[in-house]
Image (cartoon, rainbow, N blue to C red):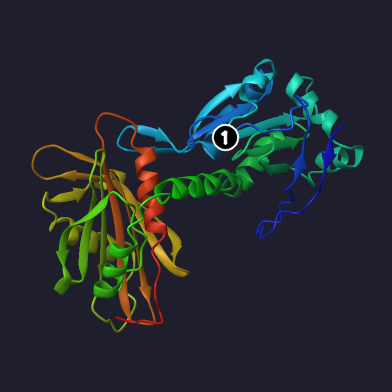
């Protein structure tokens, strides 16, 4: 009844064995898969009530982390469901099924019955933990099954491997957002003009336009034409003798730019965060938090990424902001993040 393919997750730096392909034929004999349902930032979690009571907080920390916008918002909004709701949630765009072997709830029993004795033994030994499959019960669906021997082991694995587990859903969401952003009327001519005049290589969606240019100072600012408000700023330094990028430099450089905006803004230091990332394959620092105006009250979330390109000896800073006081801001912040992720360095054409 069930066809299981086993594969070790590629690129795992922590030694976690992840089974990538798990094929489940469970609910109907329909040969045509429906389209996935639900928002791209919604996560359906199919779990037994007893297990949920034990591990809900850890699940939310891993898969639904909170960001301040300034209101607390989750990267994925959780929707918990039990076995009696499986027919309603099986086509969810992001579906997480969580089970343990030492409990007899219907979700755990469903998963247990799907596994061969060899896989059950591997789960009991901690060798296997994650089963992941795309487009299983619906088109454009990401499904993941987490299985451990008991709740304590599940919590331990979630805490150890949370970043990788989150990224499986997050990467799929990023691709969905990117597809939606650029599916029509991408501004390739405008992007080519910006690349030619500034050396910034970034894809520009159809509804953004240049609102400010300071070519002599090496920066420009784009704005989305429709509400909610979104802005993108691209900046580069003059050639430098050394890499200046650290947390202090990023904050000071962003603040210098923010003071030049039409509505002068500043960062709220109580919400400022930093982390190391990569931009265009180069080491970078990401700063994120809340911007706020110095004049009439206004503000929202922003994200800023800075890096040094050793080929042209310039430091780059790319940033985006969101203003939407009436509603949820995280989906629009994600759009800004995805646009920034298209930024590339053209080392064949140094400006």
Front-lying residue, 165 or 204? 204
- Residue 221 in percent (x, y) is at 21, 58
Front-lying residue, 129 or 225? 225
Q: Measured along the vertical axis of the image, is residue 88 above or below residue 32?
A: above
Residue 272 in view:
no
Q: Measured along the vertical axis of the image, is residue 156 above or below residue 207?
A: above
Residue occupying image coordinates x 8% and y 42%: 295
Which quarter of the rendering shows the N terminus?
Answer: top right
Please, what secondary structure does the residue beneath circle 1 have? Answer: loop
- Residue 202 in percent (x, y) is at 36, 63
- Name the residue that disc number 1 marks: 93
Classify residue 14 by image quadrant.
bottom right
Q: Measured along the vertical axis of the image, is residue 334 above or below residue 304?
A: above
- Residue 260 in percent (x, y) is at 12, 58
Front-lying residue, 330 or 93? 93
Q: Residue furthest right?
A: 117
Q: Residues within 10 Å of mark 1 (few under 14, many from 20)?
A: many
Residue 99 in view:
yes
Residue occupying image coordinates x 62% and y 24%: 89
Q: Residue furthest top?
A: 84
Classify residue 296 by image quadrant.
top left
């Amino acid at each position: 009844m069930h066809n299981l393919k086993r594969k070790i997750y590629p690129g795992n730096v922590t030694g976690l064995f992840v089974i990538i392909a798990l094929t489940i034929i469970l609910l109907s004999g329909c040969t045509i898969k429906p389209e996935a349902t639900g928002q791209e930032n919604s996560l359906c979690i199919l779990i037994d009530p007893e297990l949920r009571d034990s591990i809900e907080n850890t699940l939310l920390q891993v898969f639904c982390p909170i960001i301040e916008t300034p209101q607390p918002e989750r990267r994925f909004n959780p929707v918990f469901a039990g076995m009696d709701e499986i027919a309603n949630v099986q086509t969810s765009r992001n579906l997480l099924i969580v089970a343990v072997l030492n409990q007899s709830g219907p979700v755990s029993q469903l998963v247990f019955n799907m596994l061969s004795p060899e896989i059950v033994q591997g789960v009991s030994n901690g060798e296997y933990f994650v089963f992941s499959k795309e487009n299983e019960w619906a088109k454009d669906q990401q499904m993941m099954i987490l299985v451990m021997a008991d709740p304590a082991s599940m919590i331990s694995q979630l805490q150890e491997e949370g970043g990788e587990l989150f990224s499986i859903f997050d990467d799929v969401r990023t691709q969905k957002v990117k597809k939606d952003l650029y599916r029509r009327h991408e501004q390739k001519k405008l992007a080519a003009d910006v690349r030619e005049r500034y050396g910034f290589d970034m894809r520009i969606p159809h509804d953004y336009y240049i609102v400010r240019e300071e070519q002599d100072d090496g920066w420009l600012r784009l704005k989305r034409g429709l509400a909610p408000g979104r802005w993108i700023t691209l900046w580069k330094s003059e050639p430098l003798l050394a890499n200046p990028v650290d947390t202090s430099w990023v904050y000071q450089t962003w603040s210098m730019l923010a003071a030049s905006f039409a509505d002068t803004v500043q960062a709220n230091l109580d919400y400022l965060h930093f982390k190391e990332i990569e931009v265009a394959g180069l080491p970078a620092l990401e700063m994120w938090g809340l911007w706020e105006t110095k004049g009439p009250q206004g503000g929202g979330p922003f994200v800023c990424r800075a890096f040094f390109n050793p080929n042209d000896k310039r430091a780059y800073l790319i940033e985006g902001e969101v203003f939407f006081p009436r509603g949820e801001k995280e989906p629009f912040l994600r759009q800004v993040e995805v646009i920034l992720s298209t930024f590339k360095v053209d080392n064949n054409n140094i400006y």
